[in-house]
Image (tube, rainbow, N blue to C red):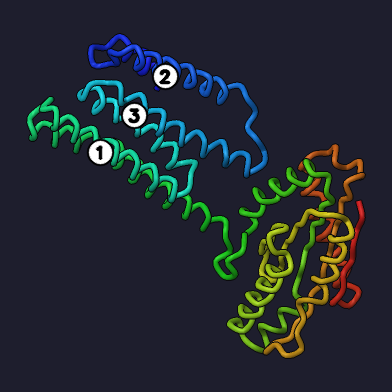
Amino acid sequence: MAFISLLMLFSSHGPTSAAGRTWIIVVLALQVMVAIGWLVLPIPSRPRALASIFIGFAVFGDVGLTSVLWFYDDFGRLLGGILFAVTGAFCTYFMSPRWLAAHLLWSSAVICLISFSAFHHRAEDAATLIAVTSAVLIATNGAPLFAHVAWTLIARDARSSALDPLTGILNRRGADTALLDLWSGAQQRGLAVAVLVVDIDKFKRVNDEHGHARGDQVIVLTAHRLSELIGDRGVLARTGGEEFLAACAGPRETLHALIKNVEIGLYERSDPVPVTVSVGAAVLPPESTLWSVGSSILLRMSRIADSQMYRAKETGGNRVCLALL
């Protein structure tokens, strides 16, 4: 966009007034600064900061382009309107659907206003203006819309492949990426991390005595209760038939309380098929030297939690066995 703005300074369709040239040079300088900033500045890790930068970039792209186009002649404005597709592509892949809709409304209104101005000045005949305006609108609106639909379908398929079809929570594949994100956030904020392996006690008896359909209901109910206990604080996945993996980050005292709640919060005497669980847990406090191992410690923690879960089963089940690393 900056390169095209520079070329248009020497175009016969570009700005003719001193004020127009001055403003375009100012915007050109801002465009170069923004481009350099994208290349050399670090990307913020905080979601709110990153969202603010994305919003600012989208607004700058739309408003900046509109202000520059206003100093071109009618033909230059219509031709330059195609550049709204650049911001449209950005909104498609990095912004919410609402922001994409807002961008499309803005760009369409500006292009139609430019076309009306060209018709008013009789720059071209009506048929030519309608054809050119339609082509520009298709380029600026059609491409982002089709790309958004395609991106949404691809993302939906990707999310589906990471989810357990029975419970709707993550499967083992989906848990891997989520665990890395959890680990990174905990390391940055200096929080403890806990990994839990939860297994339903005597589940084979449930299937044998009540049928597989009832067994599936028990798994779904257990997943639902675990989801309520874990909430947005961590990761929950179904990693086997009746086995779940959960991971949370937070203060050590909070994690210990959560582990205790998992032990007692999954059993309800009034359930159609009351079941208990065996829980194995591995807790990594923020002061542990094992943080230096890196994210690979997550695999070790899951193995330790798994062995602790089997230890809980061997001692009768319906209990927690915990290892502090």
Q: Residue at x 47, y 55 (%)?
A: 156
Looking at the image, tell me whether mark 1 or mark 2 is earlier in sequence order: 2
* Secondary element at image label 3: helix
Q: Residue at x 89, y 60 (%)?
A: 253
Circle 3 packing at 10 Å, graded few (<14), some (14-19), many (20+), is many
Q: Amino acid at mark 3?
A: Leu
Instruction: Compare residues 47 and 266 and report the one nearer the observer.
Output: 47
* Secondary element at image label 2: helix
Vertical position of residue 133 compared to residue 6: above or below: below
Instruction: Compare residues 162 and 203 and report the one nearer the observer.
Output: 162
Instruction: Compare residues 193 and 245 and report the one nearer the observer.
Output: 193
Label disc, if present, on residue 145 of the rendered structure: none
Label disc, if present, on residue 83 of the rendered structure: 3
What x and y, as percent, mark residue 125?
7, 30
- What's the distance in space between the residues labelled 1 and 3, CA to CA? 11 Å
Circle 2 packing at 10 Å, graded few (<14), some (14-19), many (20+), is some
Vertical position of residue 154 compared to residue 85: above or below: below
The residue at which mark 1 appears reads as 137
Q: Amino acid at mark 1?
A: Leu
What x and y, as percent, mark residue 189?
79, 44
Instruction: Determine whether, in the image, residue 60 is placed left or right of residue 46.
Output: left
What x and y, as percent, mark residue 231?
69, 64
- What's the distance in space between the residues labelled 1 and 2, CA to CA? 22 Å
Looking at the image, tell me whether mark 2 or mark 3 is earlier in sequence order: 2
What x and y, as percent, mark residue 144?
35, 41
Q: Amino acid at mark 2?
A: Ala
Q: Which residue occupies the extreme top position in the image? A: 10
Instruction: Determine whether, in the image, residue 3 is placed left or right of residue 283.
Output: left
The residue at which mark 2 appears reads as 2
